[in-house]
Each structure stands twice: as structure tokens, then as C-alpha cells.
Amino acid sequence: MRAQPLVLAFAWVLTGCAAAPPAPELPPAAPPNVNTQIGFRDPEALREHFSKHGREFGQITQPQYLLMAQTLRDSQADGKAILIAYRPDGVITKFDFSTGGFLAYNRDKVIRTFFKPNDGVRYFNRQKGRN
């Protein structure tokens, strides 16, 4: 009778009933029109911006933050829900009324910054003429 618990314990280990390690976090799926190959200028710039601004968008991960920025960058600006401006210095800016997100990126689509300005669309309007 005493051997049975040992056999059961041995079977428990062999069948994988022990807690499995957590699965690695998968990046979120991108909408079909979003170019996920271009993001911030380098991984360090992404880390810095996410560290500074990520929590402004709620409890999101760094890959989610990046995808939100890429999605806004590649979204059609209709002048109502999403505004767009082309600055004299070549930087393109967008403002998303639904999230309050402000995005600035270069002509080559490299993201410069993504955050929620305290004064929302007024910040976007001030940035339009910036050199």
C-alpha cells in the first residue's frame, strides 16, 4: 500500500500535471493596413517612449503601445476623428480624438513620439507650425 503514493507521485510528474511555465507574450495582431516593419528609430527609443508615455494609454504592454502608434500613423485622417498636419520641417503629426493620442513621425514613417498631451487637440494645433 505504501508504494502506491510513490507511483502516483511519479505518474503526476510524468504526465505534466505540474504547473507549466507561463507562455511568452505574443505581440498583438496588426490590422492589415498597418506596416509593422517600421516603428521608432531603434529599440532604445521605443523603450524610452514607452517608459515615459505608455501608462497614459492604460495598462498596455510595449508591443501594444508600438502597435497603437503604428496604427495611428497608417490610419486614414478624415479631418474629424483623426487630424493630420504636415509641418514645414517635414514632420507629419496626427491627433486621434478617440484616444487623445498625438503622434509625430518622419516622411519615412519612422515614429518620433506618441503620447497623450495634457491639452489634447490644442497641442496638435500648436505643433502644426513648428519648425
Image (spheres, rainbow, N blue to C red):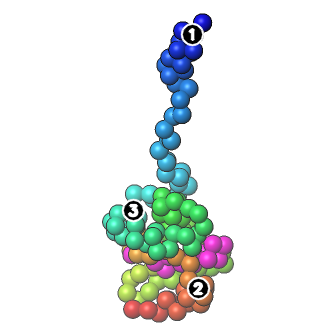
Task: Specify the label residue 2 is tagged with.
Answer: 1
Task: Kindly identify which residue carries mark 2.
Answer: 118
Residue 86 vs 29, above or below: the answer is below
Q: Main secondary structure of the magenta part?
A: strand
Other-residue count near label 1 (Cα within 10 Å), few / some / many at <14 / 14–19 / ≥20 = few
C-alpha separation, residue under disc 3 versus residue under disc 1: 63 Å
Task: Specify the label residue 11 is tagged with.
Answer: none
Q: What residue is drawn where x is 57% and y is 73%? A: 56
Q: What residue is drawn where x is 44% and y is 86%? A: 87
Residue 62 vs 111, above or below: the answer is above
Based on the picture, tell me whether residue 16 belongs to the magenta stretch.
Answer: no
State the count of labels.
3
Secondary structure, mark 3, is loop
The magenta stretch spans which residues?
93-106
Q: What is the x, y in percent for residue 30?
A: 53, 54
Secondary structure, mark 2, is loop
Other-residue count near label 3 (Cα within 10 Å), few / some / many at <14 / 14–19 / ≥20 = some
Task: Kindly identify which residue carries mark 3.
Answer: 38
Q: What is the x, y in percent for residue 21?
A: 48, 38
| Disc 3 to disc 1: CB gap under 8 Å | no
C-alpha separation, residue under disc 1 versus residue under disc 2: 69 Å
Q: Earlier in the sequence, mark 3 or mark 1?
A: 1
| Disc 1 to disc 2: CB gap under 8 Å | no
Q: What residue is drawn where x is 54% and y is 51%? A: 29
- Give the amino acid type for the residue marked by disc 1 in the picture: Arg
